[in-house]
């Protein structure tokens, strides 16, 4: 195994994480719809059935509740299942299994029965997907006590956080920004597996902090690049883990800059972005020079492909929000 | 196609019947089942009384369904798994879990009071049919490891309308999972009668659509249940895959103490089913076979009474419920946010004690 970073797409990074986890631990099994010989509709499970056999990576009947329910049962009996929901909005039939059982089992049983299950969810938009293929469903999961909710934005994190998720004793909802699946980045497979629950400062800035996760991270980084050319120094915090939430890293950055904009694709009402804004307001009030702004999707069902660019947070919309942060008082 | 007539080995008065499809289990086995029925009936009565005394928040009684409860537990071998619902307290106790641990849920102290992994008994499921896919997962896991473990999953007639019932049976059949799906058709889902759940000739007929064997059995006949469930467990243990078993039975009590059964069923109907009581017919048969005498009856009754007395004593005393547990188990390691919330509650409680 090379220790040099390799160029991998996010789909390849995830595939490598599954391979490495399955090699390291025989109890790791992968199943879902089309994940077997086809390798998944996004090819994330490509070659796993051939490499590990049908008992380790297999197709199931087309039934998401059954898939998550079966994963719960297998986890009850010694396995570490990693299941794929084909698309964000196709995971809703599994919602009861996720909220009533996967999330609660450890608590119900006083910690006697923990469920090391990873539910992989290709999520969010920007791919020209038709109806029901582009939801940002993270708020449902983040609101449900007992779930770990991870949202990688880089291919390095896609690899590292999936390894961490599979190793976790807790159930993990693993949100994969499907817009990133086929973009290549350097990935260091020998790097240490990152801890769950830590945000990453992607760019240090002096004037304001952009707080983002998943597909909103590259948008925020692009906004910071552009702002720099205009003389404004923006930092970018990538949350990576929505639950547990890294208050320490987020608040340290905001206290330094005194200004914050939260960027996310999901509709803003009652959202993760709202939770982040509320936490920043509660914990950083005396450091803030301006109200915390949110740049999110509109409070609408995900739009059709020809209209989605109006809905998604753009560099311009992020910078407009930054412009709004009461600089006249600075 | 599934037979429309339920498998029955004993008539309501204990007379041997049957059509030769299943053999009569030996008397010593049925004597043990009868002993279980006596314990189960007494536990149902005791738990219902504890609700009236305010010692349990609620108790969904399986009075009238004791044969299903006792035999479901008895046909399993050590290492097999049971997946119960909220009405299956008796089956869980018959699997060896202490009644007071089972009643933790209904006492309101915690959600599941026993160790599911130690006992191989899943937590009691309240959302209907949601436990059935778990049963398939446990069974499939065992099969992948080459073990002959069997999983018996309980549900009621109402649960057969749920999507998870369908998904679980379909998965089990596709994966040849060693699961026995045991439906206690007690005729009502709270108030809604069977006719509003299904237009199928019997619930067992649903097995045809999944490609699995299915049997309709008299659910008040412990002998027939022993034969039918025993066969299903044996088939599952030897690689034959899942079986759907429908028990024709009846919920003698209301859904719970909070229910008013007079609004949806007649006394005459309840009386008719009371005549088909599972204890009466098995007792009559064992008496006729000279397998059960007064001394044994007295011993069984005394054993059941001792269980009831232990339950009364345990639930009669109030004990503190630790508040730190609210936060301790949600994640393997409490999140910083939960640690802070636990500290907040501890501080509130300490301040409250200081104020007193």
Image: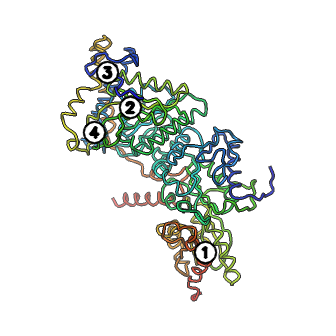
Q: CA distance from mark 2 to mark 4?
A: 31 Å
Q: Nearer the viewer, mark 3 or mark 2?
A: 2
Q: Residues within 10 Å of mark 1 (few under 14, many from 20)?
A: many
Q: CA distance from mark 4 to mark 1?
A: 62 Å
Q: Mark 3 or mark 4, which is nearer the start of the sequence?
A: 4
Q: Which residue is mark 4?
A: B50
Please say whether residue A238 is visible from this viewpoint.
yes
Q: Residue at x 67, y 59 (%)?
A: A181
Name the one closer to the observer, A230 or B306. Answer: A230
Q: Disc 2 is attached to a residue of which chain?
A: B
Question: What residue occupies the far front of the structure in this picture?
Answer: B1
Q: Which residue is mark 2?
A: B246
Q: CA distance from mark 2 to mark 1?
A: 58 Å
Name the one closer to the observer, A305 or A175. Answer: A305
User: In this picture, is B301 found above or below B344?
Assistant: above
Secondary structure found at label 2: strand
Q: Nearer the viewer, mark 4 or mark 1?
A: 1
* Position in image of residue B7 (x %, y %): 36, 23
Q: Nearer the viewer, mark 2 or mark 1?
A: 2
User: In this picture, is B164 found above or below A315?
Assistant: above
Q: Residues within 10 Å of mark 4 (few under 14, many from 20)?
A: many
Q: CA distance from mark 4 to mark 3?
A: 22 Å
Same chain for the residues under marks 3 and 2 in the image? yes
Same chain for the residues under marks 2 and 4 in the image? yes
Q: Which residue is mark 1?
A: A314
Q: Which residue is mark 3?
A: B300
């Amino acid at each position: 195994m090379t220790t040099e970073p390799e160029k991998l797409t996010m789909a390849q990074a995830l595939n490598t994480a599954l391979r490495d986890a399955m090699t390291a631990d025989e109890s790791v099994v992968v199943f879902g719809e089309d994940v077997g010989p086809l390798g998944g509709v996004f090819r994330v499970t490509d070659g796993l059935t051939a490499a590990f056999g049908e008992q380790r990576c297999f197709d199931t009947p087309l039934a998401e509740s059954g898939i998550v329910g079966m994963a719960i049962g297998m986890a009850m009996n010694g396995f570490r299942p990693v299941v794929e929901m084909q698309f964000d909005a196709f995971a809703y039939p599994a919602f009861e299994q996720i909220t009533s059982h996967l999330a609660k089992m450890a608590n119900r049983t006083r910690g006697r029965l923990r469920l090391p299950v990873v539910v992989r969810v290709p999520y969010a938009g920007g791919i020209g997907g038709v109806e029901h293929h582009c939801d940002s469903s993270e708020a449902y999961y983040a609101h449900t006590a007992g779930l770990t909710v991870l949202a990688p934005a880089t291919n390095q994190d896609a690899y590292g956080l999936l390894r961490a998720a599979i190793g976790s004793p807790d159930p993990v909802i693993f949100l994969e920004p499907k817009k990133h699946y086929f973009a290549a980045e350097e990935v260091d497979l020998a790097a240490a597996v990152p801890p769950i629950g830590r945000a990453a400062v992607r760019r240090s800035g002096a004037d304001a902090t952009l707080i983002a996760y998943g597909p909103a991270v590259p948008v925020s980084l692009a906004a910071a690049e552009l702002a720099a050319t205009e003389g404004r120094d923006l930092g970018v915090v990538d949350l990576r883990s929505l639950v547990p939430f890294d208050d320490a890293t987020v608040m340290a950055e905001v206290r330094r800059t005194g200004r914050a904009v939260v960027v996310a694709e999901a509709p803003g009402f009652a959202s993760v972005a709202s939770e982040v804004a509320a936490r920043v307001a509660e914990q950083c009030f005396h450091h803030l020079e301006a109200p915390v702004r949110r740049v999110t999707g509109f409070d609408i069902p995900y739009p059709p492909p020809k209209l989605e660019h109006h809905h998604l947070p753009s560099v311009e919309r992020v910078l407009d929000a930054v412009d709004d942060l009461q600089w006249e008082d600075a | 196609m599934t037979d429309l007539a339920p498998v029955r080995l004993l008539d309501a008065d204990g007379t041997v019947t049957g059509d030769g499809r299943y053999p009569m289990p030996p008397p010593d086995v049925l004597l043990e089942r009868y002993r279980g029925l006596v314990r189960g009936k007494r536990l149902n009565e005791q738990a219902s009384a504890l609700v009236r005394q305010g010692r349990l928040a609620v108790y969904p009684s399986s009075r009238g369904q004791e044969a299903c409860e006792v035999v479901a537990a008895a046909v399993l071998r050590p290492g097999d798994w049971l997946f119960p619902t909220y009405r299956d307290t008796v089956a869980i106790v018959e699997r060896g879990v202490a009644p007071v641990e089972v009643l933790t849920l209904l006492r309101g102290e915690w959600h599941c009071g026993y160790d599911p992994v130690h006992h191989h008994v899943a937590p009691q499921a309240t959302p209907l049919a949601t436990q059935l896919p778990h049963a398939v997962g446990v069974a499939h896991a065992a099969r992948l490891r080459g073990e002959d473990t069997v999983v018996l999953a309980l549900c009621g007639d109402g649960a057969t309308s749920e999507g998870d019932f369908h998904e679980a049976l379909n998965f089990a059949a596709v994966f040849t999972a060693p699961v026995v799906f045991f439906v206690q058709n007690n005729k009502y889902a709270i108030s809604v009668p069977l006719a509003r759940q299904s237009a199928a000739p019997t619930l067992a007929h649903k097995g045809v659509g999944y490609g699995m064997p299915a049997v309709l059995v008299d659910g008040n006949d412990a002998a027939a249940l022993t034969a039918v469930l025993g066969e299903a467990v044996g088939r599952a243990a030897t690689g034959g895959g899942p079986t759907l078993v429908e028990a024709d039975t009846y919920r003698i009590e209301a859904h719970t103490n909070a229910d008013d059964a007079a609004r949806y069923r007649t006394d005459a109907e309840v009386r008719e089913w009371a005549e088909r009581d599972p204890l009466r017919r098995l007792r009559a048969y064992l008496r006729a076979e000279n397998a059960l005498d007064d001394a044994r009856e007295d011993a069984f009754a005394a054993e059941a009474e001792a269980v009831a007395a232990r339950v009364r004593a345990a639930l009669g005393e109030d004990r503190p419920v630790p508040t730190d547990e609210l936060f301790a188990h949600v994640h393997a390691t409490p999140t910083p946010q939960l640690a802070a919330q636990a500290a907040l509650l501890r501080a509130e409680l300490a301040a409250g004690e200081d104020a007193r």
